[in-house]
Image (spheres, coloured by chain):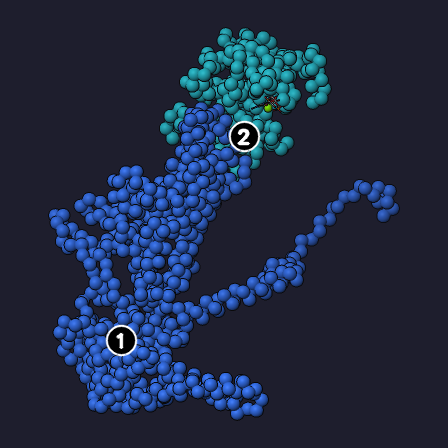
Chain colours: A blue, B cyan
Amino acid sequence: MAASNQSKHNIVYFEEPPTKAPPLLAVGPLAWIRDNLFSSWLDAILTFLGIAFIIAIITTFLQWSIGDANWFAVLFNMRQFMVGRLEVLAEWRVAVLVLIVAFASGLAWAAWSARISRMVIVATAVIIALIFVIPPIISAVVPLPGAYLVAGNQSVSAGSLTQVAQDQLAFVGRSGDKVTFRIADEIAVNDQSLENLFSFSDNLANTLRATAATGLATHVRIDEINALLASEDLTERQRTNLENELGRIEPPLTVTETYSINQLPVLVRVLEGATLEPLAEATLEPGGDVFSVTLPSDGWYVVEKTMAEGEGLAILDTTGIYPILHRSFTRGEELGEGGEVVSEAGRVEQFVRMTDNYVLEAPQPSNNGTDIPYSTIIEFKYRGLRPLGDYLSLFFGPLLAMLSTPVLVIVIAIALGYTAGLLADSLFSPAEKPRKASQQSATWLLIATPALMFILVAGVGDILPLTDPRRWGGLLLTMMLTVVGIIGSFPIGVLLALGRRSSLPVVKLVCTLYIELVRGVPFISVLFMGALLLPLTNPALSEVPGAYRAMIATIIFSAAYLAENVRGGLQSIPPGQEEAAKAIGLNGLQTIMFITLPQALRAVIPALVGMFIGLFKDTSLVAIVGLIDLTGITNAVVAQTEFLGDRREAFLFISIIYFVFSYVMSYVSRRIEASGAGAAMAKRI
Amino acid sequence: MSESLVEQGAVTQMADEPIIFCQNVNKWFGEFHVLRDVSLEVMPKEVVVILGPSGSGKSTFIRCINRLEEHQEGQIIVDGMELTHDVRNIAAIRREIGMVFQQFNLFPHKTVLENITLGPMKVRHWPRDRAEAKAQELLNRVGIPEQAAKYPGQLSGGQQQRVAIARALAMEPKIMLFDEPTSALDPEMIKEVLDVMKELARSGMTMLVVTHEMGFAREVADRVIFFDHGRIVEQGTPDYFFEEAQHERTKLFLSQIL
Ligand SMILES: Nc1ncnc2c1ncn2[C@@H]1O[C@H](COP(=O)(O)OP(=O)(O)OP(=O)(O)O)[C@@H](O)[C@H]1O
Ligand SMILES: [Mg+2]
């Protein structure tokens, strides 16, 4: 040690310190929680507030979604949300388009993404199996809620209205369906039980329930006032007020007693819809058994319910009779082999059973020329808070059932694309570029897809009959506007960006003017110009369908923004790149095409995709110029009398659609950024 | 080989015609007179090193030779073609001149192989096979045959600069311009680049090199040129230049860097 005192600045460390495992609290989930969620008091409070907030939102949403929301507004109008009012005969073309896109994504996956792991395959298979298995399980375990229908010949007056029960009611049934009828004794024991008549019920049943409920509430109030009057400490004034109120209140009658509900037998007959031939009949006795009929085939049926004798009312608890939505579409022209019109453009009248979306095109039953009323959605409402079981059997099961086949087919198409990619690679790709074949074919297919989209949706000449662009709608129109907007504005935007950087003053001026003018105007004005002003300049332009004019407006608008983004990218390329390109002898055009533009575009992928996502969502503005894109069709959906007041459900649904597609775009953009030279370029040179 | 050339003394004996001929080249950046009456003749296979303080116009001068900068007065003739505004002449001259930059300027979105084959395929219209064979041969020559499939961002600085040399050579130029090729490199990587350049010089390439590597200048150069304030102040063989330089400015410069 003495030696080191003399030369304490010269030290050699021969011994290496040992490598130790980190202390327990520095790694692992606990450490993560401590460091990220509770690193300080403020953090801890924010964490708790955040969690509380999320829980509050989720529970509120679930309560509303299960108990209250009318998801029929979404389930029923799925076709409109997807394709708007597209001709029925062109539907298969949209399906083909979807399959092509799915195939292309599978191919792209094989070309650019990591190999699908066994985990993903198993998970997908399990999910699909669940989608297929859950609906039947739900319908086996949780029966559909019954419907309460009133039969009888006694009229019910509520306020100024007098209502009578319908003797005949048409409904849609399927072969093998069991329809059951029973006098709902437990409902009509007294007014308290009547007040709890939830589930589907017809208008008259609802009137009875509402009257019972008001009566009960009035009785409660009367009791309350009497209790107050009995007490000593009231001022004179309060006492007179209360007495006055009591005097004004008419003690309500008890509904169950007034109408002698469920006292008499009811004759129930089930008729075949088309012929009105009776299928089965029974007289239901109060306290009696269930009368059930198994339907022989798909189609219309009529139930006839009358008092067998005497005067009275009965509330029937039925199953198998559900509300029906009437809708009509244009079918479109169908051409035969020789180009002759096989079936004319015409209206298709559809009756859709609410609980399972079963579609019937047969005409509504009628009796001597008068239509027999069917159970419409408005007549035949679900009343009261829904229990979970009814939510599952009414919405969740049918939603999955509706999704199952399309999901399966799409997944198969993706898998086919993926397998095709693998196959192509193993057959044709050279060893040093093992994915060349799949990448090339995926690129070509992706390039061709927009053109295919247009051909399939719009139609060409004789082979695919032209569709009416005014009928394009929903997600289809939104996608078309977006895709056409992106593809159309891309070359224009790039040219504008190059033009604005050009050394030729006139070109530069024109490009700058265009960009600044368009950027100074809101999209909505450009749309209005396309929709309203352009036709003024040349009347022929008003013949051009609104969808096309909106596409042009979209292109014009987004080209300007795209140009500025690309220009930013070009500016970020160091001048050395251009010099190096010149030094190896490339000319101006080659330098742009091979050196500066590719790098500039890659550099602005995030900005471009941000812009494209914005464009995708901004297409919703076309609803204002009368197009029925996703937003436009939603406005139309919630304007139907059946779904008035269901704005929340419909808009929530399309928000989810907008979100999913935006997220996919941003995911793809991140993949592109990280692909190829992207990983290496992140480390700038 | 270069030594034997130096021993021969007079460069004019090497070949009859200069491959680069500059006479009274003048250039201004706005008001700033950056090149003043620069005259220089370079013979085929000659290696010329250009020295000079920062801002003296070395880069500007050699960039004038392949027209990355435009001179405003005087004459530059490369391989018998005069540099004018004629675009075809410029293109033809650029095909004959390779250039290596201080900042490498590789194309980051292209692989090493694509960086090298781009010029031959797009400018000389070689088929891909031929361009790739040439590229692989050049990568062997600069000592990194295994890096062909990588992107520039995945290489070290020295490797990148060697790729840049290979890229320039792929066009089979008659002249190579180097603008401080080792200035952006870590000391450990300088040697690998200089070795490639020495090998190139020995193989008989005409080279114009701006550098601060005095060792390289002494060993490889046939002639050293000293720039100051946009003009040539002094030139001579390395032996002369480093031992017997006459001009005050040269002496000051050498005293500062040696
Ligand atoms: N594009 C330009 N515009 C204006 N002035 C310039 C430009 N390029 C270079 N200059 C100026 O010209 C002078 C010569 O520059 P040049 O790059 O040729 O010097 P250099 O000798 O290569 O210096 P260094 O050793 O720092 O690279 C410098 O003063 C520089 O500021
Ligand atoms: Mg320089």
Compared to residue B87, the image places residue A389 above or below, namely below
- Residue A247 image-quadrant placement: bottom left
Report crowding for label 2: few under 14, some 14 to 19, many 20 or more residues within 10 A (C-alpha).
many
- Rendering coords of residue A92 (x, y %): 25, 54
Q: Secondary structure at mark 1?
A: loop
Q: Amino acid at mark 2?
A: Phe
Q: Residue at x 25, y 40 (%)?
A: A540
Residue B46 higher or lower than A652, as above or below: above
User: Residue A70, how many percent across, how many down?
Assistant: 37, 68
> Residue A200, image x and y in percent?
33, 76
Residue A135: % across, % down: 33, 70
Q: Assign the C terminus of chain A to one quadrant of the image.
A: top right
Residue type at numbered disc 1? Ile
Is residue A641 positioned above or below A248 on the image?
Answer: above
Q: Nearer the viewer, residue A134 or A636?
A: A636
Decide if residue A63 is on the left or right side of residue B36: left
| Residue carrying label 1 | A321
Q: Residue at x 50, y 43 (%)?
A: A679
Residue A637 in sight in this render? yes
Badge 2 element = loop
Rendering quarter of residue A272: bottom left
- Marks 1/2: CA–CA distance: 79 Å
Q: Please report, as a chain letter, where disc 1 is located.
A: A
Residue A445: image quadrant is top left
Q: Is residue A479 above or below residue A363?
A: above
Say how many tags the image has.
2
* Residue ID at (63%, 12%): B236
Label 1 CA crowd tier, 10 Å (few <14, some 14–19, many 20+): many
Which residue carries the number 2 mark?
B104
Looking at the image, which is closer to me, A522 or A448? Answer: A522
